[in-house]
Amino acid sequence: MTRRSISFLFALFLLLSTASAEKKAKYVFYFITDGTGVNTILGAEMYNAAKKGVIGREPFFMTQFPVVSMASTYSFDSGVTDSAASGTALATGVKTKNGAVGVKDDLTTPVTSVAAWAKEAGMRVGVATSVPVNHATPAAFFAHNGKRSDYYGIGADMVSSGFDFYGGAEVKDHYDAKKHPGQPDIYDELRKNGYTLAFGVEDFKAKAGKAEKLVLLQDTLRLNPASGTFSIPYAIEAREGELRIEDILLCEIDFLMKDNDNGFFLMNEIGGKVDWACHAQDAATAFAEVAAVDRCIKIAYDFYLQHPDETLIVLTADHETGGLVLAEDDIYALNLKVLENQRVSMDGFSARLRSMKEKAGKNVTWEMAQQALKECYGFWDTVEITPDEEKMLKETHTRSFADGAQEVKNEYSANLALADLAKRIINKKALVSWRTKGHSAGLVPVFAIGCGSEAFQGFNDNALIPKKIAKAAGYTIPRQ
């Protein structure tokens, strides 16, 4: 080979390398699974294996991505973040104080998100979640508020954002005459500003074709009696025809691809209710939610296969919740298969007990409660209950249905004591334990594939992730 040939090949290599390096992600999937630490995913994988009688892991789709990394999550003012501060870091690249969304640590100065940068670059933009749209994590992508609890104010920021698609359970406090006298319904304001509201998948299909901007919510608002909050059902107990996070994601992709030449930025908090289950220390429910997250990842991956050179998929979490430990009582074993007997969330079981109480009043007998425990947890039938455990269950049954019975509270729900005890018993039999009902500073996973995914190799911090996404997609990152 001549020197001229070698020079030509070297120049060609440099040209191809430069072209590859300059390739930008046209389609960005930014997924957040709330409250999901490394052990949350590992536990769910080991549970899947245990159901097949195997010790080890049955890997999820996401854990087989070429980039498997981790990230720290501390906030501006605390080693243990809340969802508002972590959401802001993940959205804007700016650390702020716990409780604040889309503002600096002075709680006033607004900062813009990677979603806004994408919109500025001409992308279609969607923000969605499995919980209310104006909850802290999704809110960080469009709102600017020093108080995450100001749901009405955050909802109002949806109106002015100009994003193309929103999806979730509801817009919490969209109208409250007592808290906000004289203020309009956020749903009405969205409509006035060009948004079409669709309630459920069938309504979406009927309206999406003519809609310029769209908000997808539940077709029938499902009130979780244990929390007083409207939310999409937990995956462990979802019934046929109910809105699932997979449905929201499919609608989001479909709408963002409509009349789309420039590409899209899609944020979806696909694991919003992993956090809720971990606040409740409900292992079986949390693992079922993680499985739902992975089904969403498979949907995105199928899209990636159609556009492999133009798509970037990134999944991370805003923080770990619950301090999940895959061990109990110094026993060198796990018994995760027993969780297969749990058929409802703790909230769902508590709702069933409340329904029994409404119908029978004080006459909810031990035998009635025992039958519910058999049907929902497999106790006595397939899960052995010791005499001491049965005694505790009987005593707790009496307290749960007495006048003025106190309920057991966590971040998002309050449950009858009998429901809480049933959950604790099956957790103990599974040999898993929890350290807290709140958040921890534990590391969270980062999974990535596609155009620019190599940037997520190595250790990440949450505030670096949106900047890496913006660089991979060619968005302009403002100084803020």
Image: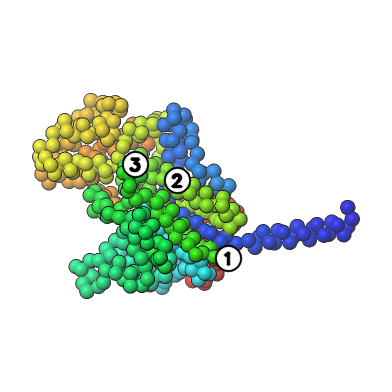
Q: Secondary structure at mark 3?
A: helix
Residue 425: x and y in percent read 29, 34
Label located before the other in sequence (3 or 1): 3
Quote the CA–CA distance across marks 3 and 2.
14 Å
Q: Nearer the viewer, mark 1 or mark 2?
A: 2
Quarter residue 158 falls in: bottom left
- Tell me which residue sits at (56%, 52%) in the image: 306
On the question of residue 455 being in view, the answer is no
- Tell me which residue sits at (30%, 64%) in the image: 151
Label located before the other in sequence (3 or 2): 3
Q: Which residue is mark 1?
A: 474
- Tell me which residue sits at (40%, 61%) in the image: 208
On the question of residue 151 being in view, the answer is yes
| Residue density around tag 3, few if under 14, some if 14–19, many if 20 or more, within 10 Å | some
The correct choice, above or below, for 328 with respect to 450 in the image is: above
Q: Which residue is mark 2?
A: 295
Residue 290: x and y in percent read 41, 44
Quote the CA–CA distance across marks 1 and 2.
28 Å
Q: Which residue is mark 3?
A: 236
Q: Tag count in the figure?
A: 3
Label 2 amino acid? Arg
